[in-house]
Amino acid sequence: LECIIIGSSPAYNGIDPSKISMRTLNMAAPAMILSITTSIAKDYILPHASSKLKVIVAELIPYLMSWDTHRIIPRMTGLYDSKGYQEDMGNNFYKQGIPAEIITKINHYNQDQWLGHDTAGFYYNKIQGNGWGEPVVQGKDYSFTDSVVQSQLSGLKEMIDSATSKGIYVLLVNLPQNPLYKDMEMMGFWGPTYETYHKVVAYINSLAEKNSHLRFYDAGNDGDHDFTDDEALDANHLNYKGAARMGVKIDSILQQMIP
């Protein structure tokens, strides 16, 4: 792998890996939040990546940052409660090498077991969706200085520092939502307010100023984006058409980032 995508359902639905001109795997999954994706990167991707890995494309996931993932059951949307995760954690995530019996299982896993996906991890069921629809809000605001929020951002910085210290680039992406959110207090379906979101962006930009291997791409652009109703699955997800164009946009940025 040369490129790995991590994130929640907006990245899972909204970034087509086949449009990226590197060998890419989309590891995003529904219901993820920032602390989950950074854990996956730190515990699984970075310790086991080959020398060919060039970049991690990570959805910023600015919503739900105040969720205390160590107290919510299932913790981290199930990651800490997973028997497999507990086994891996108990073995220090096999940083000294993956056992032969696990390698054997991996080698027996093939296309027939992906059930509707391709081997790049993308769901190619071409569901048109209902367009952007109404800009519904179900989330709420949080304080940027909240200890849980700061913990999640610290985890993100730790992941970025770990990746870039190995020469791996990191592209953080905020994906587009219904453009009508630009006329509302909340910046998307799950929030937060624009005021809080801009504080998060300022923090990310401060990291990028000090790290030449990090870049932030705000595809949502406070609602001023060019993704049409025909490219939307619903208020906060792109459909397969939008995902294809987003993949092209991301590929263009990666070509600029990576020598």
Image (spheres, grey):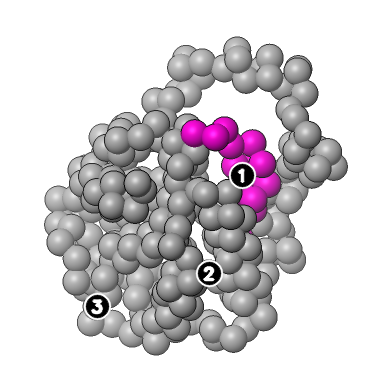
Residue at the disc numbered 1: 46
Q: How far apart are marks 2 and 1 (CA)?
A: 25 Å
Classify 184 as above or below 61. Answer: below
Q: Give the range drawn in magenta.
A: 35-52
Helix, strand or loop status at disc 2: loop
* Location of residue 151 in the rendering, given as x and y in whole percent from the top left corner: 66, 72
Question: In the picture, residue 197 is in which quadrant?
Answer: bottom left
Q: Nearer the viewer, residue 244 or 49?
A: 49
Task: Report if residue 39 lies within the magenta region.
Answer: yes
Q: Which amino acid does label 2 sit on?
A: Leu
Question: For residue 64, which numbered disc appears in the image?
Answer: 2
Q: Which of marks 2 and 1 is in front?
A: 1
Dot label at residue 182: 3
Is 150 left, or right, of 184 in this rendering? right
Nearer the observer: mark 3 or 1; the answer is: 1
The furthest residue to the right: 90
Mark with earlier residue (3, 1): 1
Q: Which residue is depicted at the point 58% across and 49% down? A: 166
